[in-house]
Amino acid sequence: MGSKRIVLEAQDLIYEIGGRRIINGVSLAFQEATFYSIVGPNGCGKTTLLDLLSGVRKPTSGEIKLYGTELTEMSQRDIARAISLMPQSFDVSFDFYVYEVLLMGRYPYKGRFSSFDDRDFKMVEKVVQELNLRGVVNRRITCLSGGERQRSIFGRVLVQDTPIVFLDEATSNLDPYYRYAMLDKVYEMTRRKGITVVSVFHDLSLASLYGDHVLMMKDGRIVYQGSRERVLTPENIKDVFGIDVKLLKDSETGIACLIPVRDKGG
Amino acid sequence: MRQEMQEYSLSEHIVLSEKRFFLVVFTLLGLLCVSLMAYTGMGYMPIPFKEVWSIVYQTLVGRSAEAKAIFGKKWYIVMEVRLPRILCSALVGTALSICGVVYQGVLLNPLADPYTLGVSAGASFGAALALVFDLEFYFGLSIQLVAFLFAVIALVLVLKMSTFKGVVSPTSLILSGVIIGAIFSAGLSFMKYLAGEEVGSIIFWLMGSFASKNWNDVLVLAIFTLLAFPIFFTFARDLNSLSMGDRCAYSLGVNPNFVRVFLLTISSLLVAVSVSISGIIGFVGIMVPHFFRFIVGPDNRKLLVVSAIGGAIFLATADNATRVWLPMEVPIGVLTAITGGPFFAVVFRKKTLRRESPWAARG
């Protein structure tokens, strides 16, 4: 573990808006080839943290380094070649073909006047194969179902081919098959290509299933972080979310499963 | 099987759509050249195509004196009366159409047109002010200049009003445009009231006209349009990214707030120039981009090129209609809406029914 390179780190991040402190002193370091799960109650600053780390918002104070370079010294295009984001909502305002959306993933690598070449097309072809998008690639994105659209946007993220991938509640609209397929895919990429995945989850079981490392946030701070066994304990979950859960361990794989405990048995 | 029908590869599909695009571009370019030449020959005194060509060609290669000697009155009609007017209408058509593309792309709103941000309201008020108080006579300020100044004032107010800590959202822009527009419209109504008997000249100015345009107007329009177009084109992909939402745009390397303010400023300046020269011509900026989105798709790179040419053809044709084909000069703004509206309605219905579209019911 110790030999892995640190790709993205933050020191004492603070972010205030309208006099309210959304992020309150966050320090972290993300390593390559690792899957990070971020969990926390609504409004605890998970999405804002991703925004700060990817240059969408500027922190009130604190510093962020991407591959050792201050984020403030990098252009948005430089950042886009290092970090891609799979957002929570996927509203597309105009009826682009899905292949056009996929090709947008190549924009950060393209000069303002250059057009796409065979390498870009090959990249898209590969992603279409891998994600089973053959049936939708020649359709318009506005005509797809929520899940198909989400998979197309995920395809755009893969086409962008960055060493760091942010997933913000990225699997919320997907049926179980594609949810696991998508997460399996990025998990496998952390192992095979050494990319870093930072994923915000509402579903604690998913966070536990994929996260090599889990960060638990509350009120703009990271309150617990470490391996899933250390972080996702009934005590911590009670503390952060205020719910009672029971931990069940699968006897074969050793994967922990969280079962909510109801106060009143039904 | 349906699957097999779609079994051509992605790059083939893209090459196909590129071919289609270039076909559309060259067709439109040809159409533009032919129509501009043809319109120049038309009018109260018809001039054969050959003579028009000869006059223009001789003048272009620097033999205007000889041409004048040969063609006499016809030379003046072509070079000093018809061509400036026709080129002005074509350039304004281009300007309004590419600004329409930019406004719709930036505001993520298919209803946006170049007048959404109150530029037209500002310009109208300025023009009315100049007409009522006769600023040209007292201060040497032409109607055009005052209209332009107030258009810029409206734009600055809207941009200032809609920026919150460096963040500019489409909704705040549209709202600010409506508010500032309403204030200037009230001012315009007051000017009309003050004008009393002379209200006609204000109304006529507002409805737009290309009558008695000269080479100066052509030059100003050409400079601004030719400066703006390459800028828009280099930002066309950024506009595509914007349509994925702000956070996606950021993650594709685009700062949406910068792009919005920058492109809106440039396009509003261009609109201000064209409004101050030709008055307010509605419907072009909203119809032309929509029409061509049906044909080449929403990719703003293609859309800009095609709308630029198509807009020129459309407005030049509309102006030719009022100049030549109709028994009396109908205000050009009225004509564009009356002719363009039903045509656009038919295309909208047909295209939407024929292919997958967000507006068509899903089967």
Image (tube, coloured by chain):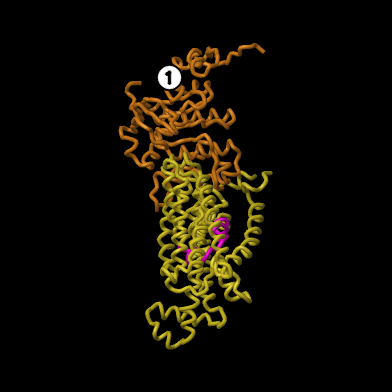
Chain colours: A orange, B yellow
Q: Is residue B357 above or below residue B286?
A: above
Q: Nearer the viewer, residue B346 or A134?
A: B346
Lateral position of residue B237 relative to residue B336, left or right:
left
Q: Look at the image and tell me in which quarter the C terminus of chain A lies.
A: top right
Q: Is residue A127 above or below residue B50?
A: above
Lateral position of residue B285 relative to residue A112, left or right:
right
**Chain at numbered mark 1:** A
Q: Nearer the viewer, residue B227 or B209?
A: B209
| Point 54% across, 24% down: residue | A203
Circle 1 — which element? Answer: strand
Point out the residue furthest to the left here: A68
Which class describes the residues within 10 Å of circle 1: few (<14), some (14-19), or many (20+)? some
Q: Nearer the viewer, residue A253 or B64?
A: B64
Residue A8: x and y, percent?
A: 36, 30
Q: Quadrant of residue B256?
A: top left
Q: Using the rendered image of the protein, determine whether residue B21 is visible from the camera's viewpoint.
A: no
Residue A197: x and y, percent?
A: 43, 29
Q: Look at the image and tell me in which quarter the N terminus of chain A lies.
A: top left
Can residue A51 be found in the magenta stretch? no
Magenta: main secondary structure equals helix
Give the residue number, with chain letter if any, for mark 1. A223
* Amino acid under disc 1: Val
| Residues drawn in magenta | B273-290
| Point 33% across, 21% down: residue | A2
